[in-house]
Amino acid sequence: MSETHSGALPGCPTPRRIVSGDMLSCATDQFNLGESTLAKKQRETKPARIPTKRQLAKWEQQKRLQRIALVVGVVFVVFVLSYVGYGYYTDELKPLSQEAIRVNDTVFDMGYYIEMLRTYGKGQDPNQLSEIADIVIGLIQSNELAKQGAQSLGVSIEAEEIDSELKRLGLPNDQVSQDIIGAQLLAGKLMTDYFSLQVPVTGDQVRAQAMFLESEKVAQGVINRLEKGEDFATIATELSLEKETQSRSGDLGWLPKGFTEILVGSKVPEEVAFSLEPGGLSQPVYDAEFIKNIGYWLIEVIEKKPEQGIQAKAMLLGSEEEVELVRAKLDLGEDFTALAKLHSQHQGSKENGGDLGWLKPGMINQVFDKVAFTLEPGKLSEPVRDDMVQTKGGYWLVKVLEKEANRQLEVETRELMMSTIYENWLIGLRETSTVENYIGQEGKAWALSRAFGERR
């Protein structure tokens, strides 16, 4: 009988006999598998090879090269970022932080100026932006002067008031908007709490008409027209050389004392008006200091040269009547130089007896050029009227319509008087303060470019 095996080899079917071809094959495979596993275990427990000194040196060199490459890469990146950052700082940030305006100890930088330009220039004609650039400088200075001056008067605006007004107007709550609204609120508070106390509520007043004329001869001609029944308002609109009386057709309204200097820039009409009775018309009253936008030239060309233009002398006089008197003296042989020193109002040549030197077109103005460059040497021009120049002196005509004692001042009159006092107060602050503008023409051009870009 055959012996039987009580156990089976792993991975083989249970044997039926001890000796069998299938069982032998399976046993052989298992023996080979065990031998392979043993060899693997032996390899795993085999000691690692020790690197040679050359290999160690090579590895250290490779690590050093890797570290150097890493450091160089980091340095390069830092350099690039620094270069870009420096360029951005130099081109973008540094100019914005430069000092632009100083009012005593308060400094405003270019960034602030640009934001103010954007605010005030928004929606404006691009051709007016250069003018706005100057206006904004003045506003920044005046607003800060008012703020500092108001503190000395005990007048201020709380932050809550500014925030409330910004919210009401739907404006952004940034520094520029806060300053603009704060300045407006402060001006109103100064008017109400301080300057209104300096303006009377009632006072003696006259209701008057007035016009300013270039000469006594013209004024007498107006009187003749009025005596013939012509309307004062119509003539004032036609002939007055003062813009307020011309635009108002001569009507100055009710005048309290001290108001005509504010309204028309002269005390003379008020002094005359208070000396007249209702219905009275003044004689021509001379005002030597009043400036009008008109003058008359007498021009004489001495020599002409194609390369140099003309050599000329001239007198600028205040009225056609004065020109006629001076020309009559010249015709009698009096010296041009002496008469120019005595009568001319052209500041550039008066001290030189009217000598203008060599001139080319555009050096005086178009009205002057039109006559001077057509004159032959040695010839004296006819009187040349020029509305592009200013001269002093003229005559007031004043007519009083009504008078009333202790009359209440009109709202518009009081507001104008308060505004004038406020402006004079600011002028006084400016005269006693350190106010500097560091922007210059190039700075304004750069700021406008930054603020508006393509609009310019």
Image: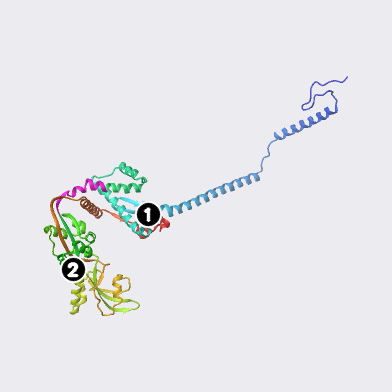
Q: How many marks?
A: 2
Residue at 17 percent across and 63 percent down: it is: 396
- Tag 2, which secondary structure? helix
Q: Tell me, what colour scheme is on the image? A: rainbow
Quadrant the N terminus occupies: top right
In the image, which is nearer the foreground, mark 1 or mark 2? 2
Q: Amino acid at mark 1?
A: Gly
Residue 196: say if magenta.
Answer: yes
Q: Which residue is mark 1?
A: 123
User: At 19% from the left edge and 71% from the top edge, which residue is drawn?
Assistant: 321
Is 163 displayed left or right of 63 in the figure? left
Farthest residue, direction right? 1
What residue range appears in magenta?
187-205
Q: Position of residue 2 (x, y in %)?
A: 87, 20
Kind of residue sitting beneath label 2: Val
Question: Which residue in the protein does label 2 denote?
Answer: 218
Q: Secondary structure at mark 1?
A: loop
Q: Position of residue 368 (x, y in %)?
A: 28, 72
Q: CA distance from mark 1 to mark 2?
A: 46 Å
* Quadrant position of residue 211: bottom left
Pinpoint residue 55: horizontal percent, then vertical percent.
65, 45
Label 1 vs 2, first from the N-terminus: 1
* Residue 132 drawn in magenta: no
Q: Residue 287: tell me if it is visible.
A: no
Give whichever of 39, 89 is nearer the camera: 89
Q: Is residue 412 visible?
A: yes
Q: Dot 1, how many residues are within 10 Å of its Cα: few (below 14), some (14-19), or many (20+)?
A: few
